[in-house]
Image: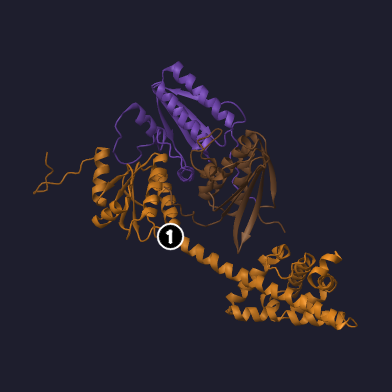
Amino acid sequence: MDTAAGAQARLPIRSDMDLMWVRQHVRQMAAALGFGLVDQTKLVTAASELARNTLVYGGGGTMETTPLAEGGTPGLRLTFRDEGPGIADLEQALQDGFTSGEGLGMGLGGARRLVHEFAIESSPGAGTTVRVTSWVGRPPLRREEV
Amino acid sequence: MPEQAQKTSGSPTPEVRDFLRRRREQIAQRWADEPLFRSVFTVSRDEAVEAGKSVVDALAQVADAERVEDPDAAGFAAVREQLARMGAARSRAGLSTGQVSTELAALRPPVENLLLSDLQGASADHTRASVTVLNVLMGTLRVVVMQTALSEGQSLIDRQRLQLLEVATPVIKLWDGIVAVPLIGTLDSARSQVVMETLLETIVEQQARHAILDITGVPAVDSLVAQHLMKTVAAARLMGAECIVSGIRPAIAQTMVHLGLDLGNVVTRASLADALGYVLHQLGVGIVTPGPNGAVPR
Amino acid sequence: MNEAVPWPLPGPATGHVPVLRLGDVLLVTLQGDLYDSTAEQLQRDLAEAIARSGAAGVVIDVSGVDVVDSFLGRILAEIAGQARLLAARTVLVGMRPAVAITLVELGLTLPGLRTALSTEAAMELLTGRAWPARSGGRHRGSP
């Protein structure tokens, strides 16, 4: 009873080679689920940002992909988990420009703008879990900020 | 898992599950004669029986998971598509949603009769509890079919809406390397996404270095519309094309100033003609009006 | 149901993106997906190549790239920044629409980078010749 794009999968995030696997896997699943080219690209980019966060701030972890169907609309959920130091101030971490590692500080906040649903759980010492979901054919969310 | 079963209703759920597995063939045979299956599988009765069996299997799986009241139970996943097809076939045949629901309801009595005959000799309480579980389960099946029917309708509406948007967003070539999109109507998120994609694709196809977004037909510019315009301009710039926003009517210019909206360093012009003139000037193309006797001056 | 899935082109396994020289312009073509280390290596290679050749311009063709995240975006911005310090101008060429939309949504508009639709357009931008306004085929063929 697997859906077209296959069942859940879990990929390790341990090196920048793994980041490439993450991108290719998400691209393939998104295409199989029927995401358009732009939405595929947004999802793959969000996955790359979040996987890099997992690698750089979390010291490595995993990404889990889950194909979804809600009332006939296919969707894809990506869950990033790490056992790293965690984030003390989530509000601040979601601000553009905030960074404690590399990149332009677009990681979390940027990824949030590329998906339909975004949830993060983290506390100091307890690791971080980020869960993002996008749905096929749904327009991007309204954003207040330019 | 007897303890888990007690939690719901004595232990009738495993009982119903076992009954469904045991009587799979007979249930499917009886369903094949009911209007729903008979009218969908007109060619082959065997096919109807097979379809019936997979529905029975799904029900047994849902009962096994103790999720008889849950239309989102994993057990339904395997037959959701099949049920959707059956529901859709009946709708196409002209049945109302209510009529499809009635046909679904007709699947229950044959199963209930079989269950009752299997429960002969059991206590009245046990029989009642088991029949209740079956009824709940069959009710949930109805909900699942109705859900899929409704979402089919919704996704059809979504698809048509998207097609309409694409039709309503023509990108016009004005000159070699200059394209324009006349925007008409409200510019919401879905619409502006389509506009952006269509325009950027055309920029690549035509190798258009200049694109004019004409908002003469946009009734109002609020911060959201301004944001969409800015995003489109920024994306075009990343690809190597310059956007000009034209058709800013005086009233709109006033509102924008009042709202404190700024299009940043985007080039703007009052009319599409002004914008075209600006781009042609950029390209070094001059437009010359012929003299009174048709002669070109100079 | 998986047969129609476009699998992205594998990037070069490790290390090197070749830097070509055309007159006083350096040309780099990125393809497929890049390892972070490959992009970082390219950034170092380009700095050296500009200093060594005294090139006046760098053209980076990204038409074969299907994802640019903030990491690669930062590298591209830094390449342009270091080129500017070495008196060379950088033009990014052929970004795909889906990538451009995603970068804007991500908040990365790369303001310091010049862009062009084709390598020819980029060369014209760098060599300073006026954009020819004759009709048809201006981005094809040699000048």
Say above or below: A11 vs A15: below
Chain with purple colouring: C
Say above or below: C4 vs A60: below
Question: B167 and C88: which one is in front?
Answer: C88
Question: B85 and B229: which one is in front?
Answer: B229
Question: C6 and B144: which one is in front?
Answer: B144
Say above or below: B8 vs B107: above
Q: Evaluate whether residue B247 shows in this view.
A: no
> Does C85 sit left or right of B174 as displayed?
right
Question: What residue is disc 1 on?
Answer: B165
Q: Evaluate whether residue A4 shows in this view.
A: yes
Label 1: few (<14), some (14–19) or many (≥20) C-alpha neighbours in 10 Å = some
Please identify the quarter of the rendering in which residue A101 is found.
top right
Helix, strand or loop at label 1? It is helix
Q: Position of residue B259 (x, y in %)?
A: 32, 53
> Does A4 sit left or right of B92 as displayed?
right
Q: Position of residue B221 (x, y in %)?
A: 33, 56
Q: Outermost residue, right direction?
A: B121
Q: Outermost residue, top direction?
A: C52
Which residue lies at the image location 20% right of the left edge and 44% below the top edge?
B287
Q: Position of residue B103 (x, y in %)?
A: 67, 80
Q: Outermost residue, left direction?
A: B292
Chain with orange colouring: B
Say above or below: B139 vs A50: below
> Does B10 sit left or right of C59 as displayed?
right
Which residue lies at the image location 47% right of the left edge and 42% below the top edge?
C103
Q: Position of residue A99 (x, y in %)?
A: 53, 36
Q: Amino acid at mark 1?
A: Leu
Please report, as a chain letter, where disc 1 is located: B
The N terminus of chain A: image quadrant: bottom right
Which residue lies at the image location 47% right of the left edge and 63% below the top edge?
B161
Chain with brown colouring: A
